[in-house]
Image (cartoon, coloured by chain):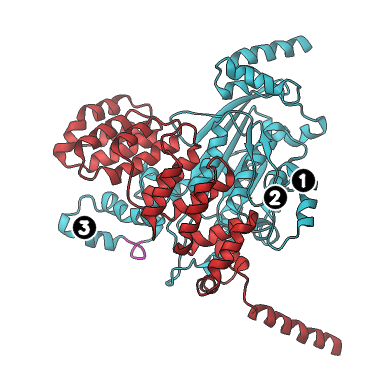
Chain colours: A cyan, B red
Amino acid sequence: VKMLFAAFIALSSSAFGQTCDPQGATYAACIEEAANAGQPPCLSCQVAEAVAPECNAKYDRLFRDGTVNTTIAWGYTDSNGSAEDNVWGEYWNSQIVDRLTGPCPASFQMYSPEQHGEDSEAIAGRQEATGCGGPVTFRQSCGFSRGDDPEIFTKTIVRNGRSIKLNIRVLQSALSASDSVNRSSRVEFIKKRICATTPATQVNSCVTQNTPPQVSSAQLLQSCRAGDEQLYQICRSDYVRRAWRSSIENGDEIVMYNGHARKGGGPSFDPPKVRSDGHVDYAWYESVREGHNQEAKSFETAVARGNPPVIYASHSCDSQKHFIRNGRFPEVSPTTAIVGSTRTSYSDETVGSTLATLDSAFSGSCDINTRIQSAACGFGINNF
Amino acid sequence: VRHAVLALIISSFSLTFAQAKSLSWEEAVDVVVTGEGDVAKARQGLISDPALDEQLRGGLAKGGRSELRALNAIRLLPRPSMVKELLGTLAKLPASEKQGQLYFVTLASMAGGEHGAEILAGLQAKVNVTSKTVPSSLRLALLSGMSLRSTAPTGGVLLQLLDDTSFEIRLKAMELATNRFKGGEKEQQEFLLKAMERSPYPLRLKALSVIGDLPAAQRQRYKSEVTKCAQSDQNQVVKEACASLKF
């Protein structure tokens, strides 16, 4: 068996590039050697990480078929109805993408570890317990490749002598970084997809007749074609929502939502509903809870199919309060571990938790909660 | 019973007192950021506070979460009176460090408003958008700032960005090209033809959408590339979009 294993490692080294053991004393030298040999960084980091046997069972479901599928869906990260036009998520997503596609190991340090009003003793205590706020190193949240589809990131690792394919799909809800541009793309969409054959003199009235509330959003969405998610916000939001629900229902092992909590009404993939005074209509989000009801329904479907996500991350403000204490997790899917926030979470925490959750899971880490807290103080994992 | 009634009265008084107490600037910013609480009231309280700029300066000087909170307030309200101060601090900070990056991205997100030109000049002095040594997230923030201000780099730089290692930068170059090429037909053609040959596929799809909107005579110049794409593009959606374009 030992010989077979050695042969496999040798084979995987030649197929994937050099294998560097992060527990080994020569890890840094090994990475450097691979880089000097001109190997692409992602090929030099097929980490065969030692996994504690007591944690194997927790990860059986994650690695069982040799492929781990992950979906990260960014919500519509507008500035909560403020005067600012900027949709904020693009920059923070690029912080994640830079590390996923960059060389291994990747590093990260959040900017704002302390909470409001917290004294330095409390901060020091937490930092001592979890390393929270200090620099962290990722050996798996890095070294991914992309092809022609910008949403898809892939790499292959060796775990317990077995080759595992890691697929990450990253979905971005906002068409551009400008909320006004995104919202105004609806007019263009109606002109091109609904009023395309209307005589020029009647186009404006055609647009008016086909703008909500004259028609429902569901009616408009019927005119979205394949590829329109790249051109029009209305189609983009619907595309991301569908892909996110499908990832929960159809067996993705890890699913993440990174975006606004909307006071428990999230996940939210659309430009927000606003009141006549321009402020976000939180009363609507709180009472209807559209996003949370949709995610709960998708989890019910996944549980009925016997294949719910192993890990679900709700990277939004106070998500433990909104979606666990006052929501339907974990009861709706008792075998799913849920990553959530205990407080107002700023975007750097979302980046830290996303990378740490993936890194810990892909490494088969026993102390996933500590690793998440270390990278992103306000987040932790429940039900793991 | 008497004690219970007394406790109830005391607790309702404390509740009323707590509600009446105005929020600190830090608490108010958290309400604006999260939507937890009365956002309109918190926003109004911040805007009408004559000492706000002074408090924001204190937050910036304190560092950590207070600094982040102050930057959020300046960005969200927005607070143009603080722009000069942020630019001054940014000029002294290395863009390779987290603090400099936060100032950079905060300012970039304000480029569409008051002092936008000044902001862009400050950001461009700090970061070269084609530099290979600057993280793509920062270069993306600068390009987004340009987009918010409806401006763009030169045609030559945009062409160069189509070869960037970051897909996000390539896609942002396409977004900016629509600002840049209003009227510049030759530059536009060079850019669109190059985009039609690049990954990722949304780049080609967006180029195709621009080509589809051109007047018939101009569109004709892309006929051979679009015909080639209809036959052999590796992405089915792009292939079909090429096939559906009429000449």
What's the distance in space between the residues labelled 1 and 3, CA to CA?
A: 61 Å
Residue nearest the observer in this picture, B161 or B193: B161
Q: Which residue is mark 1?
A: A130
Q: Residue furthest bottom?
A: B2
Residue nearest the observer in this picture, B61 or B230: B61
Q: Are marks 1 and 2 in contact (CB under 8 Å)?
A: yes
Which amino acid does the dot numbered 1 rest on? Thr
Instruction: Say if labels 2 and 3 share a chain.
Output: yes
Question: Which chain's residue wears label 3?
Answer: A
Q: Left or right: where does residue A277 sit relative to residue B153?
A: right
Q: Nearer the viewer, mark 2 or mark 3?
A: 2
Q: Which residue is mark 2?
A: A377
Q: Residue at left 64%, top 58%?
A: B62
Q: Left or right: where does residue A281 sit relative to residue B216?
A: right
Q: Residue at left 81%, top 88%?
A: B6
Q: Residue furthest left?
A: B217
Which amino acid does the dot numbered 2 rest on? Cys
Q: Secondary structure at mark 2?
A: loop
Q: Which residue is mark 3?
A: A203
Magenta highlight range: A211-215
> Between disc 2 and disc 3, whose residue precedes?
3
Question: Which chain's residue wears label 2?
Answer: A
